[in-house]
Image (spheres, rainbow, N blue to C red):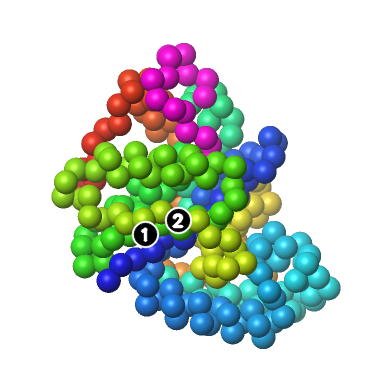
Amino acid sequence: MAMTAYFDESGTHGEASPAVIMGGFIATIAQWETYQVEISTLLQASGVKVFHAVDFRRRKNDFKNWTRAQSGQFNSKFLKLADDHMSFGLGSILASNTYKSIYRGGSGRPRRVLDSQYGLCFRVSMWRAMIFMKEREDDWPLNVVLETGHRNAGDAIRIYADIVDSLIARYRPMLGAISFESKDACLPLAMADSLSYAIFRKEAGFSTHSNPDVASTGLSIPPYVVSKVPVRRLIIDEETLVALRNEVESGKLARISLPD
């Protein structure tokens, strides 16, 4: 039984962005199928054609003129779908200033292509996803879906090929295909969009939460916090950036054996 990871980004659409986030969820094909039925029912009942986290937060487009009560009731049902149908969630966080000063500003001469900020978040997200998949051989392979149309989509394709090539033989069957879909046609990207945008808001100082692995997702009526499915925040710190920059300068990627 294969699994699929749906990832989306936040914070890549402006030079002033404090951080770039890539977040998403992993679930089995059967879990995603049930999720799609239920979210489709929720969206239709709410008069929403396409879910965009920014539109929902700002009450624009399909969410225009919604009351706080409407938003809260929708959000409570929306968040519960993650607990009901997801297996694992993650969000990679890369501060813009450290990316520019340490990774892009390295003194050595790169022998490989430098990853974009989006690309580095994708690379780290894949590493954590593979740790999740490591002991789940019955659920191999993991297929990966990203939103189509991003200017760094080619970066993700190159990085995915890098990762597949770097796997030792034991783990090579773990990864399947990478593909791109639009939010209009791919309902699972809605949950990835919600998570990445919620983490971005937290990193930008617009929201807070006492649990570091929980992203504030706004008003919900009745109150609801995603708590059954594990969600992990991965901060790409200076030490990690130095190691990644050193790989670029050496021209070699370490063979991925994955931690025990």
Residue 259 in the image: above or below residue 238:
below
Where in the figure is residue 137, as x and y percent of width and height? Answer: 21, 63
Residue in view at x 30 percent, y 26 percent = 252
Name the residue type under label 1: Asn
Dot 1 lies on which element? strand
- Does residue 85 appear in the picture of this structure? no
- Residue 103 visible to an observer of this rendering: yes
Residue 152, quarter of picture: top right
| Residue 88, image quadrant | bottom left
| 84 or 4, nearer to the observer | 4
In depth, the one of 1 and 126 nearer the eye is 1
Q: What kind of element bears circle 2?
A: strand
Magenta residues, as a range?
A: 104-118
Residue found at the far left of this picture = 170
Q: Position of residue 71 (x, y in %)?
A: 71, 74
Instruction: Name the foreground residue: 190 vs 49.
Output: 49
| Left or right of 257, for residue 51 | right
Q: CA distance from mark 2 to mark 1?
A: 8 Å
Local packing at callout 1 (Cα closer than 10 Å; few below 14, some 14-19, many 20+) is: some
Name the residue beneath numbered marker 1: 143
User: Residue at point 52% right, 45% down?
Assistant: 153
Residue most extreme to the right: 65
Give how far across and how far down residue 120 sits, in percent.
46, 38
Asked if residue 114 is among those painted magenta in the image, a careful observer would answer yes
Q: Dots 2 and 1: beta carbons under 8 Å?
A: yes
Q: Nearer the viewer, residue 80 or 114?
A: 114
The residue identified by callout 2 is: 179
Depth check, mark 2 against mark 1: the one in front is: 2
Which of the marked residues, 2 or 1, is nearer the chain's N terminus?
1
Amino acid identity at mark 2: Ser
